[in-house]
Image (tube, coloured by chain):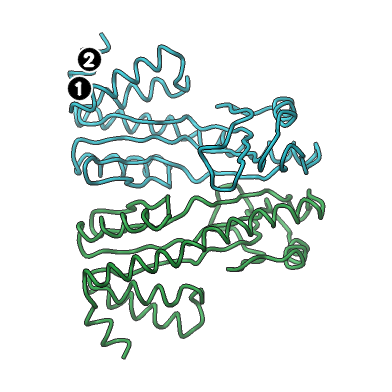
Chain colours: A green, B cyan
Amino acid sequence: MKAKREALLGLLRAIEEGKVDEDIIYLLLLINSIKGVYTTSSCSGRIGIIEEPALGAKPLSRWLVKVHRPLTFEEAKEALMRAERGLIFLKSQPPIFHVVSENLEIAKKVHALGLASGFKYTTFKAISSRYLVEINGTEYLTVPLGRDGKVFVDDEYLLFALEVGNEMLRRSKERLPRLEENFRKLKEELGEDELFRKLTR
Amino acid sequence: MKAKREALLGLLRAIEEGKVDEDIIYLLLLINSIKGVYTTSSCSGRIGIIEEPALGAKPLSRWLVKVHRPLTFEEAKEALMRAERGLIFLKSQPPIFHVVSENLEIAKKVHALGLASGFKYTTFKAISSRYLVEINGTEYLTVPLGRDGKVFVDDEYLLFALEVGNEMLRRSKERLPRLEENFRKLKEELGEDELFRKLTR
């Protein structure tokens, strides 16, 4: 897989540069070591506060704070002080993996694996030029907190919303060990990638 | 398609019983009239207040109010008075269509059609025993409002959250005419289903 070589080099470089969420580095390397699959953009799950200048104008949004573990009240308050323009949201999102497969058969195995690991929103995003499976959960929180620099919630509510968001993140991350175990089994079935072994020696 | 006959009869019955969201009846009939496709559970988009006894225990949740047009402040307040147990959420969700296709080629056309109509979260949910495309948007709002019958937000915030949720619903529904137009084109390409014509005469 030509594209796999590039993706692997990109991943290894990103890990070196500290750009990959630490708690999924091992899992990403495991998946990429399997013959016939590789990962593209993936995230270990996150919670943060984001500004969206216009509803739906996603490229123009900016994160005021974004972490891959529970967000503290102090961090949230500090981030909110930096809000300027647009709708302010507290967002909690589950881990998400994008896995490209060499062929349809393998893609179907990855899809079944995602669902079996508790990631109930696992789908095929593409099945033409390449086979792309998105392993995704359902634990999403999207809470509007204010607009144009003004916060419309009090501390008590912020604490409550953070509690719910952090709990959702915790629950979705709890599935990662099961996902890892299932990818380990897939590796036993499909074998190790020679290219991966060469590049990571 | 044997399964299409059952799905069609089910849809027509549901329409008669007033169980289908009025603003997508025409679109659902249009899609089902196309040779080689039919719809399963679909929704025209909704906003409402839901109680979830335990995070993630979706089958046990109950809607306190659910509408397919903007939710008013009075409706929200009235619904909140009926909250008893579990986490209370305000949820806004875009239109969602589940389209089964006769074969992979048609499924790919439907998938491309969903994306081209602005439903950016259109994916393949199944590509084995049957080909199922989910046409879905990204405009989701999930706002925790309280717990076990107690509401943690004041009227001002509730008004604000409703404004954001209703706006998201409005924007996502705005894409429905484009979706309808694209399905009309697909019908010109694939032709009309004899079975549909027979059953709806």
x, y (%) of residue A154?
A: 82, 51
Using the image, determine if residue A156 lies above or below residue A9: above
Name the residue rendered at 81%, 53% in the picture: A156
Name the residue rendered at 60%, 40% in the picture: B52
Residue highlighted by disc 1: B193
- For the residue labelled by badge 2, is the local secondary structure a helix, a strand or a loop? helix
Residue highlighted by disc 2: B197
Quadrant the N terminus of chain B occupies: top left
Please indicate whether residue A147 sits to the left or right of residue A28 in the image.
Answer: right
Q: In which quarter of the image is residue B57?
A: top right
The answer to which of B182 and A98 lies nearer the viewer is: A98
Q: What residue type is labelled 1?
A: Asp
Please indicate whether residue A73 sits to the left or right of residue B111 in the image.
Answer: right
The answer to which of A1 and A150 lies nearer the viewer is: A1
Using the image, determine if residue B61 lies above or below residue B198: below
- For the residue labelled by badge 1, is the local secondary structure a helix, a strand or a loop? loop
Q: Which amino acid does label 2 sit on?
A: Arg
Instruction: Tell me the crowding category of disc 1: few under 14, some 14 to 19, or many 20 or more residues within 10 angstroms, Cα based.
Output: some
x, y (%) of residue A42?
A: 44, 66
Using the image, determine if residue A30 lies above or below residue B107: below
Q: Name the residue at the bottom extreme.
A: A201
**Which numbered disc covers residue B81?**
none
x, y (%) of residue A101?
A: 26, 64
> Label 2 vs label 1: CA separation?
6 Å
What's the chain of the residue with tag 2?
B
Q: Do the residues labelled 2 and 1 touch (CB within 8 Å)?
A: yes
Please indicate whether residue B182 sits to the left or right of residue B36 in the image.
Answer: right
Q: In which quarter of the image is residue B129?
A: top left
Please indicate whether residue B196 sits to the left or right of residue A133 in the image.
Answer: left
Name the residue rendered at 36%, 15% in the picture: B13
The answer to which of B133 and B112 lies nearer the viewer is: B133
What's the chain of the residue with tag 1?
B
